[in-house]
Amino acid sequence: MGKLGIDLHLDVGGGPRARSIEAALREAVTTGRLPAGTCLPGTRGLADDLGIARGTVVAAYAQLVAEGWLVSATGSGTRVADVTLPHAGAPHGPVRGVVDLRPGRPDLSLFPHGQWSAAVKRTLAAADAGSMDYGDPAGTRVLREAVATYVSRARGVRAEAGAVVITSGFTHALAVLSRALREAGAHTIATEDPGLAHHRQLIHGAGLRTAPLPVGPDGADPAGIPARAGAVLLTPAHQHPRGVVLSREARTAFLAWANERDGFVVEDDYDGEFRYDRHAVGALQALDPDRVVFAGSTSKALAPGLRLGWLVVPPRLRIPVLDALAATGASAGVPGQLALADLLDRGDYDRHVRRTRQLYRKRRTELATRLAELTDVPLDGVPAGLHALLPLASAREERRLVDAGLGAGLQLAGVHAAGYWHSARGGKAGLIVGYATPPRHAWRPALDALTGVLSGAAITPW
Amino acid sequence: MGKLGIDLHLDVGGGPRARSIEAALREAVTTGRLPAGTCLPGTRGLADDLGIARGTVVAAYAQLVAEGWLVSATGSGTRVADVTLPHAGAPHGPVRGVVDLRPGRPDLSLFPHGQWSAAVKRTLAAADAGSMDYGDPAGTRVLREAVATYVSRARGVRAEAGAVVITSGFTHALAVLSRALREAGAHTIATEDPGLAHHRQLIHGAGLRTAPLPVGPDGADPAGIPARAGAVLLTPAHQHPRGVVLSREARTAFLAWANERDGFVVEDDYDGEFRYDRHAVGALQALDPDRVVFAGSTSKALAPGLRLGWLVVPPRLRIPVLDALAATGASAGVPGQLALADLLDRGDYDRHVRRTRQLYRKRRTELATRLAELTDVPLDGVPAGLHALLPLASAREERRLVDAGLGAGLQLAGVHAAGYWHSARGGKAGLIVGYATPPRHAWRPALDALTGVLSGAAITPW
């Protein structure tokens, strides 16, 4: 296991020592100065370096493990946790000289800031003064109409403006929905296994339990719905992280379950616009708008930093969702809402999606071609989205590759290490390669470095 | 009591009748088509008009009363509740031909949209691509630094960027703080009585209780802190709605209480920039940054629609606040954050505050002058902020004046009717006149109309 000889440069100022070391470490992790996976020095060595008691360092490490910033595993020391989960709101910053290949974000150098600024200017100049008031917590009328039109056209959703609720991105939407489902009587939401740890955390934060729903080659398995589940959170168009599509049979079965058990399906359409080999699969929501909540956002098509998302809410959940939204006290700023409506209405949004889709498709093909030179095992899942899963033989191999990646200047995400498995013991291992993330100039070098890291890797189908 | 002959135009579509009437009424109220205070037709009359059973109408009214959209009082029929409370996120829209004199918002026609658009453009063009990533949930570094500098300079707050948390306006901040205080062990937050109903609702929504803290001529009374309170929510610079300033003695007493009982004070500095007769009173927070959470927003200085606010958080609450923030899943969009930082750093924000402060000071003086012609009773509170309280003899008189206001084309807010009192039985009555709200061309006609309405009113000091 390749430990990096990192130099901590901890800024330990005044105050009680343990607090200072803890604060300095937290700062180093949250700013990305210590990237995920970094091995920390042993407590004895660090204590010697700083001239303080070892117990003080032990206490600081323990506190940060408890907070989830660090993970400690027998035999492998203490390392920085992968808290920057894809489409999580977790803090992190770019690490100098390291290319980020973790999933969850588009190439941000392509964000059309000129178009965005022009849309802000145009819409604010034309808006009534009253539009800058507190306004409708469900979102401005003009954006709800634009979103309804867009998701109907692009994703086949059955939506009208009255059913659309604008949120501060998908994380806000999931926090709101969880609370609304709890108010509607749910105690447990079944979540895909593997699936995003951050989504489970948001559901727990709203006072609900989660239960694992196994994911196979046809997506989430409806036969595995836990008896106690009141709702199911799915990524039907492109399962995260496996990349598979929910089969027609499974779709029918989930809807049958929802109707029989008075349950709801939450459709997280996080990257539904990005299908490369054929026309995208339409939204599950269209099959049963009374039972499916459709959720989308601008985070993959434009940028996560916009913090703009939307829900299409079944009539029965509308009041609970508006109540839960009010309880968060949060809504998206009006200038951003008006600008997004403008980009949607003018077709600029679609054009940007088409342009970036071409680019990401090319990158995925290049990634697959390189891999084909190393192994017969294909990337798991369909050609779609902004990431691909590379299945590995073991968690040990996953750790080795993440470490080797750091040595080669790459930040890699492991299914196991990033907490995708519901059980703390984890499940199968793999790398989730976010090929959309690097800026254009960094993509080829990153691909070369990745090919080098993967040479001789124990790649095995799940 | 002047009932308006309103024409409901209820759009009762398909579905169970009661649900449709209920939905149509809710729509009419939330869009502002039926302004606060409007008397609804009797259930018998409406049932006849619609050709349905009276019981159906009764059920619909009852449901909307339960939800808080309508209020029903013996002898005065059913009326539209004033759910659009000042700095609430409640839905409402401008009512055509009616001038809004309710408190809580600045003159939105003065929103500097050209400056805002230019700041968005300038900052996005200069920003790193990485700044549009998920980023730090506590807010972008550049805005936290700009806010720390601004609140230190303008409000005397003791703040550094590390203690600042950016929120989606004050409602989000209060939801986050309530949850954080609950995690820190609080069960009850004492809130000023009278004080905003919407703030009590947000605290309840986070699973805490509220307890009333009486407000006198010197602001909230520290002798009245309920024994069970773990925190206190105050408006020290300009009590809402009374307009009084928290006395020096009371400030000291609240801080002594916080230190003795391990409690916290939340300082809602919603309009602290607007003091007209002297330099603004500095923030309470400066006296004890370990015990006071300082909260501010752009809602009064620029516009509520920006949904941008900030907290300056004591060290001990920092982790609970960040956890609670993550649980809401919401944060302000990056373009808005960067633009605000730019306006603060360039001094444009201060210049806009100074310009509007001149205008609102003038309006307050004109209001006071007109009132002096009608009564010897002065406006309650100091010359500051965006509203003034006019004390009345009774809730009946308050209702009469709100009705008369509607007849004269004015939307007025009553202390009693708008739910400012903690107890459902209410307390003293009054009008809270939001003189900042009307656009410039509407101010003089509104003042004339208000003078007419108040002629002969039973104005009595509290």
Image (spheres, coloured by chain):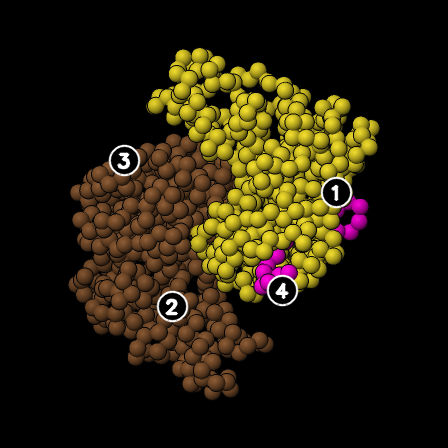
Chain colours: A yellow, B brown
The magenta-colored residue range is A257-282
Q: Which residue is mark 1?
A: A381
Chain to which the residue tagged by mark 4 belongs: A
B406 in magenta: no
> Which comes sooner in the sequence, label 4 or label 1?
4
The kind of residue on which mark 2 rests is Ala
Q: Nearer the viewer, mark 4 or mark 1?
A: 4
> Which comes sooner in the sequence, label 3 or label 2?
2
The kind of residue on which mark 4 rests is Asn
Q: Residues within 10 Å of mark 1 (few under 14, many from 20)?
A: many
* Disc on res. A259: 4
Q: Nearer the viewer, residue A405 or A256?
A: A256
Q: Is residue B121 above or below residue B423?
A: above
Magenta highlight: main SS: loop
Quote the CA–CA distance across marks 1 and 3.
57 Å
Kindly state the secondary structure of the residue where label 4 is placed. helix
Give x and y (percent) for residue A101. 66, 32
The kind of residue on which mark 1 rests is Gly
* Disc on res. B81: 2
Q: Nearer the viewer, residue A151 or A340?
A: A151
- For the N terminus of chain B, the quadrant is bottom left
Q: Nearer the viewer, residue B18 or B134?
A: B18
The kind of residue on which mark 3 rests is Asp
Quote the CA–CA distance across marks 3 and 4.
56 Å
Q: Is residue A62 visible?
A: yes
Chain to which the residue tagged by mark 3 belongs: B
Q: Nearer the viewer, mark 2 or mark 4?
A: 4
Kindly state the secondary structure of the residue where label 2 is placed. loop
Q: Which residue is mark 3?
A: B288
Chain to which the residue tagged by mark 1 belongs: A
